[in-house]
Image (cartoon, helix red, strand yellow):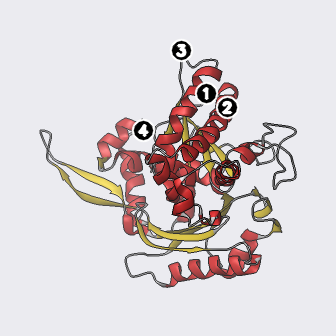
Amino acid sequence: MHQLREHAPISRATLAEITGLNKTTVSSLVQELIANQFVHEVGYDNAGVGRPAMLLELNPNAGCIISAEIGVDFVYAIRANFAAEIDWSKKQTTSPGMSQDEILNIALAFIREAIDSRNENCGDVLGLSLGVPGLVDQESGNLIFAPNLAWHNVPLARMLRENFPGIPIFVDNEANLAALGEHYFGVAQGCDDVLYVSVGVGLGGGMVRNGQIFRGKAGFAGEFGHMTIDPYGRQCNCGNRGCWETVVSQSALFRAIEQAVADGKQTVLTEMTGGDFSALSMPLIRKAAEEGDAVALEALEKVGRYLGIGIAGLINALDPDLVVFGGILSLAADLLLPTVEAELRARTISWETHSTQVVRSQHGFDACVMGGVAVVLQTILAQPTAASR
């Protein structure tokens, strides 16, 4: 199934060659997968000599996957077919004044709409995934703590099972899912060890090793945003001081700009926001930087420097094949990465002999929900008979 996903359209003979299985075994397995509608035949390969071979691929209409994300300031959901093609999506911005129940009800309504609006081509719901910005206990599916939402001990998996019985449920940290999404469908395809760093309201991280999310002993690996950069630094929402996300986040960028204005520096952002800096946004900051605005450029350089310092430490400790930079700040990746790379050259031990590349996320805002599709697909590909109808 994995070879079909990666190499389709592909013949039975080529599948046997790649997998090392004999042709009779491959034919038997393929017939079983066709009977369960996970695989279908798509025509003949007429390129070679001799008898044309029948080509196979995953059947897009084998069923659908629902993937949702609850962010710090939004709820987002998609529906994808078995070929990971999105055919429905919905997003809503949330505000700090909204209660936990209000936000959860939005997510439930989106998921219900995704399920109820299926047509005859969508098929059964093969799985439902939810990504959240916090610590998730994999055994129970409980959200233990989401610092930037101020949520504690929320039984998300139980809530989803009660509302959508009979559907396989997956709940995970949003950066873990985004890392898997980039590994499966994005810039990290073909990389064994991937480090994903997501910078938005906070800073999240995820790791994929040998095609699997790396979770660590307790399942909470990847909380890079809460590494201490300055023990006497700013108070973090997690309760610690001087966490990496206090100096590398959208909030940190906004604070740097507001401090520069308070110090008397002139910026076009004053005019862009009408003097109301609560209206600051990444697109506005990017536009100001492109116009050569010194305040915007200096703020981006400051955040980029700390971003590079943190990534350098992670590269020294973990030696990944690739670092993927995602989240809202990746909208300014071309402006931030030169500063990041300068820090990596200065601080990464192996930079001169083996430089780990830092690249912008391919799926951007969709990275987490694509990872939700990936985690369902990965489970089915590993055990297709368990998901048979």
Q: Where is residue 42 in the image (x, y as percent from the top left)?
A: 25, 59
Instruction: Report x, y in % for residue 335.
Output: 49, 41
Q: Residue at x 61, y 73 (%)?
A: 167
How much space separates mark 3 and mark 1, taking CA atoms? 16 Å
Could you say whether the residue bearing mark 3 is in a helix, strand or loop? Answer: loop
Q: Residue at x 58, y 46 (%)?
A: 295
The tag on residue 19 is: 4
Which residue is under mark 3? 353
Q: Nearer the viewer, residue 379 or 95?
A: 95
User: Mark 1 or mark 4: which is in front?
Assistant: 1
> Gap between marks 2 and 4, in whole Å?
42 Å
Inspect this view and state whether residue 382 appears: no
Q: Nearer the viewer, residue 185 or 95?
A: 95
Q: Is mark 2 on a helix, strand or loop?
A: helix
- The amino acid sitting under disc 3 is Thr
Q: Name the residue under label 1.
A: 343
Q: Of callouts 3 and 1, which one flags the residue occurring earlier in the amino acid sequence?
A: 1
N-terminal of the pair, mark 3 or mark 4, is 4
State which mark lies toward you, 2 or 4: 2
Specify the label residue 309 is tagged with. Answer: 2
Query: What is the C-alpha distance between the residues marked 2 and 1?
Result: 6 Å
Neighbour tally class for label 4: few under 14, some 14-19, many 20 plus, Cα within 10 Å: few
Residue type pointed to by label 4: Thr
Is 388 situated above or below 44? below
Q: Classify residue 328 by image quadrant.
A: bottom right
Percent x, y of residue 183:
51, 45
- Of mark 2 and mark 1, the one earlier in the sequence is 2
CB atoms of marks 2 and 1 within 8 Å: yes
Assess disc 1: are there few (<14), some (14-19) or many (≥20) residues with their C-alpha within 10 Å of its C-alpha.
many
